[in-house]
Amino acid sequence: MSPTVKWVLGALVGLPLMCCGCGGMWFKSQFPYDEALARVTTHPSVIKSLGAPVSGAFFFSGNTRSRNDDAVAEMKIDLSGSKQNAVLEVRAVQTSKVWGFSRLRVVPRNGDVINLVGGP
């Protein structure tokens, strides 16, 4: 294969990956993803239920509405542990660029619900 073809193929494959990666980081930063995972993956009840280590998926589903420095976010993040998997349900409000949680709920595969913040 000629060097020109290699450069063209590299650009065709690499450019979209690079753009999606940067866009993914920007998109992820609009959500309280890191804060939610930090609270949940170290929580004793979650570790007991899912099994250590508990980790969150890189990709998640969710939406956000923002206005100036305030926002509301809802998201679901898949969690995995050594015993079982779960889904983390998050509802958060951002005021002056600080996220606060009204829901942090872990729903393991076995159906037990672990509420870390908020009610059912």
Image (spheres, rainbow, N blue to C red):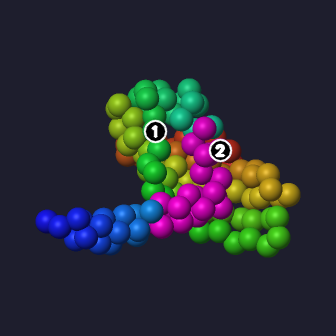
Q: In terms of depth relative to the viewer, which is nearer, 109 or 81?
A: 81
Q: In terms of depth relative to the viewer, which is nearer, 113 or 53?
A: 53
Residue to which mark 1 is pinned: 55
Residue 120, visible in the rendered structure: no
Picture residue at 79% right of the left edge, 52% below the top = 98
Element assignment for label 1? strand
Magenta-colored stretch includes residue 46: no
Picture residue at 76% right of the left edge, 50% below the top = 100
The quarter of the picture where the N terminus appears is bottom left
The answer to whether 2 is drawn above or below residue 76 in the figure is below
Picture residue at 60% right of the left edge, 51% below the top = 33
Q: Position of residue 92 (x, y in %)?
A: 70, 56
Q: Say which amino acid is labelled 1.
A: Ser
Picture residue at 54% right of the left edge, 35% below the top = 41
Q: Say which amino acid is labelled 2.
A: Glu
* Horizontal side of residue 20 vs 67, given as left or right: left
Residue that lies at the very extreme toward the left in this rendered image: 1
Q: Position of residue 70 (x, y in %)?
A: 80, 65
> What secondary structure prevails in the magenta region?
helix
* Horizontal side of residue 53 vs 96, given as left or right: left
* Horizontal side of residue 15 vs 10, given as left or right: right
Magenta-colored stretch includes residue 26: yes
Q: Position of residue 13 (x, y in %)?
A: 32, 67
Q: Position of residue 74 (x, y in %)?
A: 61, 62
* Stretch of the chain drawn in magenta: 19-38
Element assignment for label 2? helix
Residue that lies at the very extreme toward the front in this rendered image: 3
Residue to which mark 2 is pinned: 35
Alpha carbon separation for disc pair 1 and 2? 13 Å
Q: Of label 1 and label 2, which has the lower sequence position?
A: 2
Q: In terms of depth relative to the viewer, which is nearer, 8 or 71?
A: 8
